[in-house]
Amino acid sequence: MKQTSSAILLAASLLLMGQPDAAMARGVIDSATKPDMGKGAAASKDTRSMAEKAADITRVEAYLATIGSIVADFSQTSADGSSGTGKFYMKRPGKMRWQYNPPNPILLVSDGKTVTYYDPSLEQLSYVSVDDTLASFLAKRDMKLDSDSTQLTKFDVVDGKVRATIIQRKKPTEGNLTLEFSDKPLELKKILAVDATGNETRVSLDKAQFGPVLDDKLFTFVDPRGANHRRKNR
């Protein structure tokens, strides 16, 4: 399992979209080649009327608005074949935690203001404002797929699955995020993140619990390197 490269890709795709770091943003995605989630998606088409689509968009937004918190196991794969597993926590507004399993327990934590990325193999810390991340959409207070900050670029209901793709309005060429739901009943199942270079990461949520009580301490990053290391870097 090539977990390290997969975890870094998640950081790049899901949390660091649009950042100036050259290692994270090396190009522009061609909107005409945005990938779709699920096998056979190209063979099936959404033939509903505009009114029906609008009703389904409202239904998805209403569902998302009911989710105050999530705990789930996750597994992810990327285009290069790398993969990883771990635990995902979310608490609205703004709080998220992606905690990877060993052998390389990479950690991404959002406290509602700042996203912290920690790679223990390199003892590397990175920070970015949560407002600059497309993935922060999942933890927003206002759950509108099409809003002042996000644009809904694709929405379809095909083969019992609902998919919604969004981009950042201010950074439309710097990646996109697709949410996939099972239908009847609606339930969030997968996340597909595409970064500015066209690299994609697919995340599946398993054993998801919706609405659990979560301690805010989960979303506060505590530097595992210890006080001595921090003092050396002052």
Image (cartoon, rainbow, N blue to C red):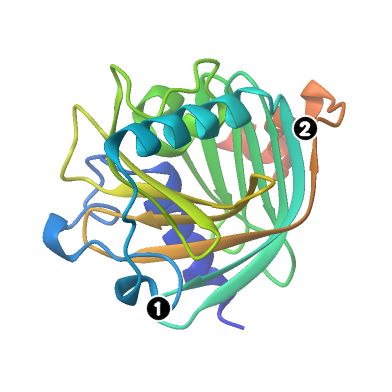
User: Identity of the amino acid at label 1?
Assistant: Gly
Q: Is residue 34 above or below residue 138?
A: below
User: Identity of the amino acid at label 2?
Assistant: Leu
Of residues 44 and 197, the one drawn nearer to the viewer in this rendering: 44
Q: Position of residue 35 (x, y in %)?
A: 30, 66
Judged from the image, the secondary structure of the residue bearing numbered disc 1 is: loop
Answer with the quarter of the image where residue 168 lies: top left
Label 1 packing within 10 angstroms: few (<14), some (14-19), many (20+) = few
Q: Which of label 1 and label 2 is nearer to you?
A: 1
Q: Position of residue 123 (x, y in %)?
A: 57, 54
Distance from Cα at disc 1 to Cα at disc 2: 38 Å
Q: Position of residue 222 (x, y in %)?
A: 72, 33
The residue indicated by pointer 2 is 218
Answer with the quarter of the image where residue 52 lies: top left
Of residues 68 and 108, the one drawn nearer to the viewer in this rendering: 68
At horizontal 69% and vertical 28% (from top left) the residue drawn is 67
Judged from the image, the secondary structure of the residue bearing numbered disc 2 is: helix
The residue indicated by pointer 1 is 40
> Position of 67 compared to 137: left or right?
right
Label 2 packing within 10 angstroms: few (<14), some (14-19), many (20+) = some
> Position of 66 compared to 171: left or right?
right
Q: Is residue 160 visible?
A: yes
Q: Position of residue 1 (x, y in %)?
A: 62, 83
